[in-house]
Image (spheres, coloured by chain):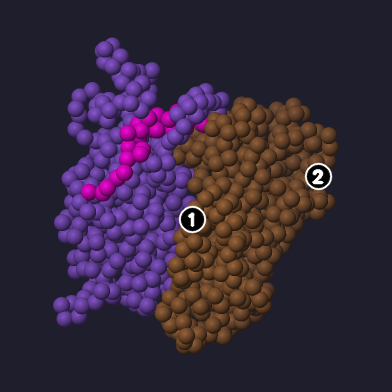
Chain colours: A brown, B purple
Amino acid sequence: MRNRVVLALAAAVCLAAFPGISAYAGKKNASDARQFFKQLPNDRKIQQALNRLTFGPLPGDAQRVKAMGLKRWVDLQLHPERLAENPVLESKLQTLDTLNMTGSEMVRNYPTPQTVRQMVQGQIPFPQDPDRKLMIQKLVARAERKQGDGSANANTNAGAITNTNAATPLRDLLTPQEAGALRTGTPQQRLAAFQALPKEKQDDVLAALPQAARQGLFVIAPPDLRRRIELASGPQQVVARDLTEGKLLRAVYSNRQLSEVLDDFWFNHFNIFLDKGADRYLVTEYERDVIRPHVLGKFRDLLEATAKSPAMLFYLDNWQSVGPDSPQLRGRKNSRGLNENYGRELLELHTLGVDGGYSQKDVTEAARCFTGWTINQPQRGGTFIFNRRVHDDGEKVVLGVKIPAGGGESDGERVLDIVARQPSTAHFISRKLAMRFVADEPPASLVNRMAQTFLKTDGDLRAVMQTMFGSREFWSEGAYRAKLKSPFEMVVSAVRALAGDVDYGFPLVNQVAQLGQPLYRKQEPTGYSNSSQEWLNSGGLLARMNFALQLADNRVPGVNVKAAKAAGPGDPLAGIGLGSPEFQKR
Amino acid sequence: MNTRRIFLRNSALAMVGAGSAPLWLQRALYAGEAPAPRKKILVAIFQRGAADGLNVVVPHGEKAYYNLRPTIAVGRPSTASDKRDDAAIDLDGFFGLHPSLAPLKPLYDGQHLAIVDAAGSPDPTRSHFDAQDYMESGTPGLKATNDGWMNRALPKAPGNSSAGPKVSPVRAVSLGPVLPRAMRGAQPAIALQSIAGFQVPNAEAARQFQEMYTNARDPVLRATGRETFEAVSMLQSILNQAYTPAGGAQYPRGRFGDNLRQIAQLIKAEVGVEMAFADIGGWDHHVNEIGARASEGQLANLLREFGQALAAFWQDMGDRMQDVVVVTMSEFGRTARENGNRGTDHGHANNMFVMGGAVKGGKVYGKWPGLEPEQLYEGRDLALTTDFRDVLGELVARHMGTPSVKGVFPGYDPKFLGLV
């Protein structure tokens, strides 16, 4: 106790010693607080709405909102089902076929080398689509050629297939004239030379081309050929590429902008790292079927959807957790046992918050409740199942609430009931939303009102958003341009500001990663920080400036912009505005 | 300071700004009034995710260790008659290094590497986020601290007057996309992902951006912008230079090795680096921490990268290591007992490595608390006997020469272990 007082004093001294440390962290004094009650003039209210409910205004957006009426526009954004989707977006998403697949469909259609091996061995069926099947058979054939054993029965050496990308050398596929034509002339001439090749040869040629040549062809290829080029470079990478490109395209083009902003927010809240093993094939359906349908629904539903998703069960290891007193473990030693990972993050990150009033004992008890919540065949894009044999069916106490013995699968659901309705959860979620939409240090008055709505409506997230958008604080000077854009927000808002046409998205996706926010690849369950300070540093600022210059000068592949008004097209300095301090804020 | 000197500095700085000043002049400028002794440098490494200290520095003399970890312990050191490459590498008859850390053994033997065991943060949290935050702010248990210990440990600049900065704009450098908590604060500190990328190649655009940021309305963007462009000028001479590590040093592939290589490059360029930071993630091994053998699997692979990078840094830096200390830390340790999935859950105390030319190495420091049930923290974790601030405080005071560490670790009085 005494120790705490000393520490607190020390901290006060330390803060006093550095008054100017961070204006972002510091909006605490009285004059700053008053800013949250100073109302914005009407034209700025429209800017504020566009900056917070969208990924940045498109040219003409302000006039459109004004014509429709701000209130009506906000209301429509809160009811995305009433908004027609942009047909441009729908056509651009069409080629990204994994976005509509289940995990198991993806595993079969875009297999890893291990999966190909299993197909050859007959453990997994080949995909039904004849083109896909052919592609996989070609992968196998290539692998066999690599071993110099092309005539052998596939089954005998299937176990040895490790590098399915081993390709026939180009010189065996093409005449010197054909190979020469692929290397010379303008990009268009090279594309024409490629398309002139017999169709059955094209995929083998793609696989054999050096990476740079393949990339050179890619940038000028029509969409269907681009797909085949991606497949030739490695089918399992297509899944990650579709996922990241899909996110970027929706953020740029969707009419349901708030929905996209919330999808970004809630995915990050329930973060999953794409590159953790089986999650490579599970995140697509996680975002599509678990996060998106619930972002304006009930928090409790969203929470359970995440808790039962194979993606989360895998990411936070719960699928392997075994009750110390479960049927499977009884009387056995050195077998699997309890894993606390999900139980802890559920309390700390998903619901109560780290200061939300739980103990180590609560973590362990929650983990016991979730034993048996596991995945059927995770490596094949599995599904949720409850396995009674590994469930600890004894009595548990979580946050003071007794969960009687014998509850089985419902033990975990009881935990979700308990934590979803805690006042600290209402407060934690409300504050996090206000940090995203209002300010890094949102006024407590607003957060409290949002939390009240949360509790009154049983966690109705649309109602919580309505409380926030209906508040004085949201439309105040204190909130106006108070946030620094995250890298993703910066890149998307820049493309939107210049009405960019995105032909293919991965170079932009790479830019977001270079600015410090690789999409779907935040390894820690915390997700990316919601605070401006996180994104403010020298290297990051320079990277933003350089991106701005490249984008406006049409030097970012895959996207075409109409250069900024002030500068003429082709002016290398057209991007100055996008790299400016003002544009980094929203 | 006389007028003539101010004039010289101003005109020389103008040259620096234009990127035309020779390197010797830049060095002379930032070296201060007299050819002062070379600055001392502290490099901090953060192992994010809570490394399993008990499998990194293995207490092979402790029977309880093997009882607690029936499937994931690292075996006792080999004997002459029984050579195994998956066994611990003995240090002192009680502790041993994980086999993947073999590249560090010569450094330990040469007394340049010290290990502090059962060290860490006294705060009981088992949250990665909070524990990292506390360790970087240097104030366990206190969330209100705005700045980090490395920033506070930088000697205060004697006022940034119009005469130009008197300290290097790159005195505090972090490698990576974000500025870590440990380096945030009142003193300028920069983050860079790569030395080569730390510039706006178009000179006219750079000039315009510099002007915009210098006049930005937002005070934080203005300050960061100014720091950024000062740092860019400072690094101009090495931005486009190829770098070959000295002494045949071979950094491992990957971000961590790249980052240590660039820290070495920055230090050797004599641009005024005093504090450097790099991190390496992926230590949160709840499942299958160890492969079929202790020398295989997730922990082994990560430790190999970690150990090779530190050893390469040592080699690359050569004699310059006399002025450099590298210190490692991780937010907390892991459960003494293995969990149900051949992994470990979140625990308490861990260990820290301290490497440098002037380090009194070849020794495992700290009091070993034991692993018997009654000796464990909360019945499950290695207990803590050394506060991480004892280690960092000593390095700040005795290596960096900061006269008082009171402001660096407010409310705490570090007890020095005699590491340097």
Residue labelled with disc 2:
A75
Q: Chain of mark 1?
A: A
Labels 2 and 1 within one chain: yes
**Relative image position of residue B173 (x, y in whole percent):** 37, 40
Q: Nearer the viewer, residue B389 or A43?
A: A43
| Residue B79 visible in image | yes
| Residue closest to the far front | A177
How many other residues sit within 10 Å of disc 2, few (<14), some (14-19) or many (≥20)? Answer: few
Relative to A149, residue A179 above or below: above
Is A458 a magenta residue? no
Q: Main secondary structure of the magenta part?
A: helix
Alpha carbon distance from label 2 to label 1: 56 Å
- Dividing the picture into quadrants, the one containing residue A98 is bottom right
Q: Nearer the viewer, residue B94 or B243?
A: B243
Q: Amino acid at mark 1?
A: Arg
Residue ID at (53%, 85%): A121
Residue toward you, A574 or B300: A574
Q: Which of pointers 2 and 1 lies earlier in the amino acid sequence?
A: 2
Q: Which residue is mark 1?
A: A183
Q: Which residues are magenta?
A: B221-246
Q: Tag 2's secondary structure? A: helix
Amino acid carrying mark 2 in the image: Asp
In the rendered structure, the answer to whether residue B36 lies left or right of residue B57 reads left
